[in-house]
């Protein structure tokens, strides 16, 4: 069983860089978590670098505007790396091809400034999936026919957000990762742009290196913080960095609630995943 900590401060001195998840750690989609923002600001005040690393399917600049609206202080972080940024890089490399955008209108900023040719699924050369068209009422089961038609044409899918679900207030809503996984089950080819896959970590550490004078920090001095076993914990382990696991996020209900989590259930989750975090905390706080 990893150590359970109530405060981040005793652990902070072992690290120079934080790769901190956003949704579920810094905010819940409705409001910022003041204690988490304070912890990040204190880490930076001590000389640390904070890169927010998020599976949001939109560019980092768009993520920042959302954080401003939720009142996450800009002093809480140095930079943002999003799966939307990684997705844009892939789209830029395929500008001669027609793309079908599977996702809500709010995510079209992924394509802003790019000379993209959009097409319906019947005529597209590949698919960028940023989520469900309407995540307030649809589920992955709503997309069976569409995914089957995509598979029949062997369309390549770029998944702009590997998350399966995310918190929105006290509810969980489905994300692009749920559709991408369903497409993979059908035999479709999928490229995942965010956590737990390496490109987003490489991009984040590249930003950290630029902020810290040009040298990529040693991995043993980098800590990932997140609330998802599938994306944050497994991603950190695969990339070779420690992880502080926050149990008040998307797994809270599975673990007995946010205030009194079931530690045996927590151990079982880690055992099934085959990964163990450096430490566990109920919520990020200094």
Image: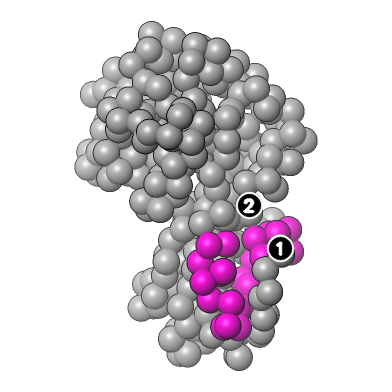
> Is residue 161 visible to the viewer in this orientation of the structure?
no
* Disc on res. 222: none
Q: Residue at 35% across / 31% down in the picture? A: 217
At which x and y percent is residue 42?
55, 13
136 sits left or right of 203 in the view? right
Q: Is residue 86 left or right of residue 242?
A: right
Q: Which mark is residue 59?
A: 2
Q: Which residue, given by chain and number where applicable, does mark 1 sit on?
A: 112
Residue 199 left/right relative to 106: left
Please report the bounds of the magenta region as a residue range: 88-111
User: Which residue is pictured at 45% across the width and 90% down the height?
Assistant: 152
- 156 or 33: which is nearer to us? 156
Residue 91 in which image quadrant: bottom right
Residue placed furthest toward the front? 213
Q: Residue at x 30, y 33 (%)?
A: 219
Q: Are marks 1 and 2 in contact (CB under 8 Å)?
A: yes
Res 220 seen here: yes
């Amino acid at each position: 069983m990893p150590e359970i900590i109530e405060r981040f401060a005793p652990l902070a001195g072992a690290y120079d860089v934080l790769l901190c998840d956003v949704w579920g750690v810094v905010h819940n989609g409705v409001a910022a978590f003041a204690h988490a923002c304070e912890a990040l600001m204190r880490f930076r005040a001590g000389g640390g670098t904070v890169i927010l690393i998020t599976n949001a399917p939109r560019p980092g600049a768009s993520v920042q505007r959302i954080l401003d609206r939720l009142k996450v202080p800009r002093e809480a972080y140095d930079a943002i790396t999003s799966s939307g940024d990684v997705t844009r890089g892939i789209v830029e490399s395929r500008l001669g091809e027609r793309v079908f955008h599977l996702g809500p209108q709010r995510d079209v900023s992924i394509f802003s400034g790019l000379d993209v040719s959009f097409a319906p699924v019947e005529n597209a050369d590949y698919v960028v999936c940023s989520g469900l068209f309407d995540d307030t009422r649809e589920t992955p089961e709503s997309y069976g026919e569409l995914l089957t038609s995509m598979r029949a044409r062997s369309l390549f899918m770029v998944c702009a957000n590997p998350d399966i679900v995310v918190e929105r207030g006290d509810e969980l809503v489905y994300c692009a990762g749920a559709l991408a996984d369903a497409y993979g089950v059908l035999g479709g080819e999928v490229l995942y742009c965010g956590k737990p896959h390496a490109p987003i970590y490489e991009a984040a550490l590249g930003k950290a290196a630029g902020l810290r004078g040009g040298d990529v920090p040693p991995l043993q001095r980098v800590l990932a913080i997140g609330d998802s076993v599938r994306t944050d914990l497994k991603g950190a382990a695969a990339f070779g960095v420690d992880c502080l696991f926050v149990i008040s996020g998307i797994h809270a209900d599975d673990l007995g609630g946010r205030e009194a989590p079931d530690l045996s259930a927590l151990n079982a989750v880690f055992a099934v995943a085959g990964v163990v975090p450096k430490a566990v905390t109920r919520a990020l706080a200094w």
